[in-house]
Amino acid sequence: ESTRRKLIDLLSRYPDEFVSGQVLSEQLNITRSAIWKHMKELEKDGYVIQSVPRKGYRILKNPDKLSANTIQWGLSTNWLGSRVIFEKTTDSTQVIAHHLGREGAQHGTVVVADEQVKGRGRLNRTWYSKKGDGIWMSLILRPEVEPQQAPQLTLLSAVAIVEALEEITDLAFYIKWPNDIYVHDHKIAGILTEMQAEQDQINYIVQGIGLNVNQNREDFNMISDNEPTSLKIETGMAWNRRPLIQVILQQIERLYERYLKEGFLPIKTMWEERAYRLGQPIMVSSKNQNWQGIFKGIDQDGALIVTDQKGRDHVLYSAEINWRSGGHE
Ligand code: BTX
């Protein structure tokens, strides 16, 4: 399996050129007939490979079919996705990831499903996860940080997902505190971070990411409380999920490494640059009280800072925010 991954990495490095059988066999330390067998396996996974005598091989087409292999081939991360578990259909990738986390699965393990029948959001809300039309995945992370810092990882991934989406589209994406990604005022993705921790130590974090990719408008008819959207609805074209997953994982890993080196501050700044309605009036419902304030930013723990009408700042860890009913709208 790792030979095949290296093979794809070599071929993808020179996308328009042929790589000779000899070079491949030297680099991978296997015979040329073994290479030919690997090529046949790749074709079964949906790759279209051109092979020309005396020139070598090149990839004409990457598959969109998801599998642990296709997700890993060409993935340029060091640890995120070094193990991938793929399910065609499952209740929820969160459930699988929690199970693996308890069993000691390594940091960076990724669980991906084509379809979830019991996909979930926060507070046990339903997350619709239609077959083949979205990215439904959970990451197992074992960060050496305090449990109360875990929410920072939600914000980190939100920034990473926005960066990934802006890398591949011309659209502008926003993060709605704490965990939703918006485009044109519609929800396109959500993040669900769950943690297994003791007093002062995180055992593992399971971070679920749901991104709508190829749904049409009518696929969301059952959702009444917000108007979801998908990449296809926003861009007018269908997207391959495989490279999208890879770009997202690469961005998350990159930011995560930065977070370990530099702390939360740079992430916080990036987050605030992408924050939905920063500096604008919002309605807060906390402790059975409703009040209007100005969304000022987030603090070191990722909590929401809202300035009330007397100019006092409030730090909110959980509150229902009505983002639209503030001010004069
Ligand atoms: P959330 O609680 O912020 O959002 C859930 C709400 O979003 C629902 O109540 C519904 O109104 C709306 N909604 C449901 N499905 C969709 C959808 N496909 N697109 C847009 N809006 C929707 C957000 O929770 C966190 C979601 C995480 C989902 C991932 S998928 C992989 C992993 N496995 C799993 O079961 N959950 C996570």
Image (cartoon, rainbow, N blue to C red):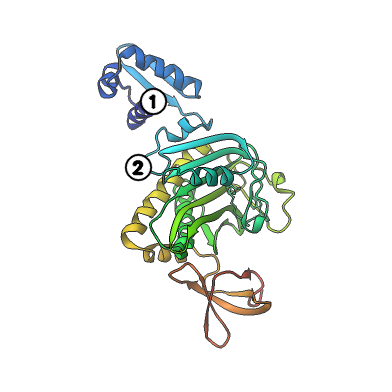
The residue sitting at 46% across, 29% down in the picture is: 62
Residue 294 in the image: x percent, y percent? 56, 77
Locate residue 228, reporting x and y percent. Answer: 65, 53
Q: Is 264 located above or below residue 294 in the figure?
A: above
> Which residue is denoted by mark 1 in the rendering?
4
Which quadrant of the rendered structure holds the N terminus? Answer: top left
**Residue corresponding to mark 2:** 78
- Kind of residue indicated by mark 2: Asn
Quadrant where the image shows the C terminus: bottom right
Looking at the image, how many numbered discs can be counted on the residues?
A: 2
Secondary structure found at label 2: loop
Considering the numbered disc 1 on the image, is that residue within a helix, a strand or a loop? helix
Answer whether residue 88 is visible to the viewer in this image. Answer: yes
Q: Is residue 322 visible?
A: no
C-alpha separation, residue under disc 1 versus residue under disc 2: 17 Å
* Residue located at (45% from left, 42% from top): 105
Does 69 appear above or below 297? Answer: above
Q: Image point 64% across, 37% down: which residue?
A: 131
* Residue 101 marker: none
For the residue pair 183 and 106, the one nearer the viewer reads as: 106
Tell me which amino acid carries mark 1.
Arg
Alpha-carbon neighbours of circle 1 within 10 Å: few (<14), some, or many (≥20)? some
In this rendering, position of residue 133 left or right of residue 35? right
Residue 324 vertical placement versus 172 (above, below): below
Q: Residues within 10 Å of mark 2 (few under 14, many from 20)?
A: few
Place of residue 252 in the rendered image (x, y in percent of width and height, measured from the top left): 42, 50
Q: Residue at x 38, y 57 (%)?
A: 144
